[in-house]
Amino acid sequence: MPDSVKLRRVLRALHKLGFKEIRQKGSHVFFEHSDGRTTMLPMHKEIRIKLLTKIIKQDMKITKKEFFEKLEQKPDLKPFCSTIFTANDELTMTLNS
């Protein structure tokens, strides 16, 4: 198992698990799930496994296996953006809500 995980991968897994960013104060972001679970994540380049394990077990209340399965999934870009071609064929990206 690696010593740390890149922040981008952790954020992707959180979103796949249904956690939404609520607010940020300094370098920490607060996430909330629709069922009421919450967690706070430091916005550093990498998250150490020891801290991530505590977040997974205590805050997210899931198993490490469930989290790492989401972490290993390939990103699905379709729900996040769509491509629109304008009259003069310029490529524009728009976010879906």
Image: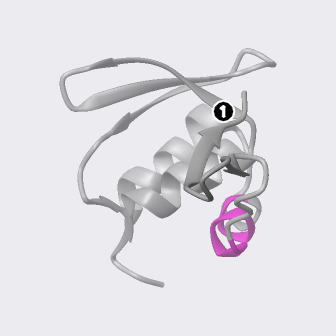
Camera-nearest residue between 57 and 87: 87
Few, some or many residues within 10 Å of mark 1 (<14, 14–19, 20+): many
Q: In the rendering, at what x and y percent does residue 1 appear?
A: 48, 84
Against 95, residue 89 (above or below) is below
Residue sitting farthest toward the left: 26
Q: According to the image, label 1 marks what residue?
A: 19
Nearer to us in this view, 51 or 25: 25
Instruction: Provide the secondary structure element on which disc 1 rests.
Output: strand
Question: Could you tell me which quadrant the C terminus lies in?
Answer: top right
Q: Residue visible at 48% across and 46% down?
A: 54
Q: Amino acid at mark 1?
A: Phe
Q: Find residue 96 and report its image quarter.
A: top right
With 68 as the anchor, is 90 left or right in this view?
left
Q: Is residue 71 above or below residue 51?
A: below
Is residue 75 within the magenta segment?
Answer: no
Magenta residues (range): 67-74
